Amino acid sequence: MIPPDPVPALNRLLASMENNPFYRAKLAAVDAPRQLVSAGDCAAVLPFTTKSELVEDCARHAPFGSNLSFPRELYCRFCQSSGTSAGPLPTLDTAESWGAMLDVWDKVYDHAGLRPGDSLFFAFSFGPFLGFWTAFEAATRRGNLAIPGGGLGTRARLEMLARYEVTVLCCTPTYALRLGEMLRSEAVHLREKIRVRLILVAGEPGGSIPATRALISSMWNGACVRDHHGMTETGPISYETTDHPGSLQVDLDSYHAEIIDPSNLQPVGAGGTGELVITTLRRLARPLLRYRTGDLVKPVWDETGLRLEGGILGRCDDMLVVRGVNLYPSALEAVVRGFPEVVEFQVRCRTVDSMTELEVVVEAADPSDADLARRIQVALGGAFALRIPVTTTAVGALPRDDFKSHRWITG
């Protein structure tokens, strides 16, 4: 498949922004042209957009901001980002822009191997985060049975999975592990009744970390694990394909993508790692132009388009410098999850004499395995050329999360 030429879609986007107060001002400030000649013009003449800009705009033009390209009465969908960086951000969509995101979800499901007779269970609390709603509605639009799991505890969700013979589970990698842990301890009686064959994960790097994927699959009777990613600000962006497991394919029909070095904002060359920058091509009602996602990725460009090798490697602001070594949480997780004896883990960060120090605490499935901590410490030393102390604790001693993990503790 040859990727589409983005220029016509970029020019349609620019034309739609003439009625968008937020982008009309941004484009006028840089004297941007109304038409692009090549895709390279996007980076050369158009400005970046950051989340902090959008949050500030919402504060000035409360409650929804001025990044709206159509009259307010045409907008019928509301979502809001989590607010973990820069603050919560409300987003509005028209029926048309909402439908464009459901179209991307069709690709997510197609490449994950969703079948007409599959039933899906969404193990989320259905708050204002966009991903839950678009995933659910895209499934029902396809004709699949979609079962909401909001407002339920972990055991109740497992009982529903078994009772209704659900075949596809949608959740974060952390929660897939949490459900699997309970399934093999407190809810063993349900194991033979579980029919889950596919687990679709997102929200954390773990979905593309081989060791984490393998652990999730082993907990769920060998179920296939597929990753994807997106943001409330942008909608669903990428999906895993069977041809390239462990990587994410960007949907270039819906997004124009760039990879930049966050330190100098210049394009990243082949083999490099940088920040993903996204321009929405079909979500015209609430567009984003060169949006800095903060997601760290390793791009692979080829005749089929753009793949993100290893998925989302982490957030640009997640990187720690530990005694001169750049360390990302996903890289450390890849090492720790390489030990199936680890039930759960936590990383404790503190500053000693102006230097960052780490300690890893793991729950050992076998409390008598006195050598586990040493083996993990050796593996971490080999991976990062750092001495990172590792200690063990009793199973159940570390906190569990029903959504995204909070394994990194500062202080």
Image (cartoon, grey):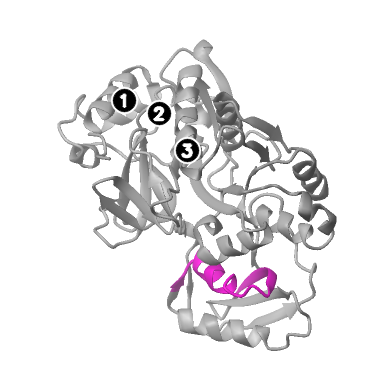
Q: Which residue is mark 2?
A: 287
Q: Amino acid at mark 2?
A: Pro
Magenta stretch encompasses residue 331 = yes
Q: Secondary structure at mark 1?
A: helix
Q: Amino acid at mark 1?
A: Leu
CA gap, disc 1 to disc 3? 27 Å
Quadrant of the frame with the N terminus: top left
Quadrant of the frame with the C terminus: bottom right
Of residues 287 and 54, the one drawn nearer to the viewer in this rendering: 287
Of residues 274 and 265, the one drawn nearer to the viewer in this rendering: 274
Decide which of tag 1 and tag 2 comes sooner along the chain.
Answer: 1
Q: Which residue is mark 1?
A: 13
Of residues 3 and 116, the one drawn nearer to the viewer in this rendering: 116
Decide which of tag 2 and tag 3 comes sooner along the chain.
Answer: 3
Q: Which residue is mark 3?
A: 110
Residue lying at 49% horizontally and 68% vertically, measured from the top left: 331
Magenta-highlighted residues: 326-350
Inspect this view and state whether residue 28 appears. no
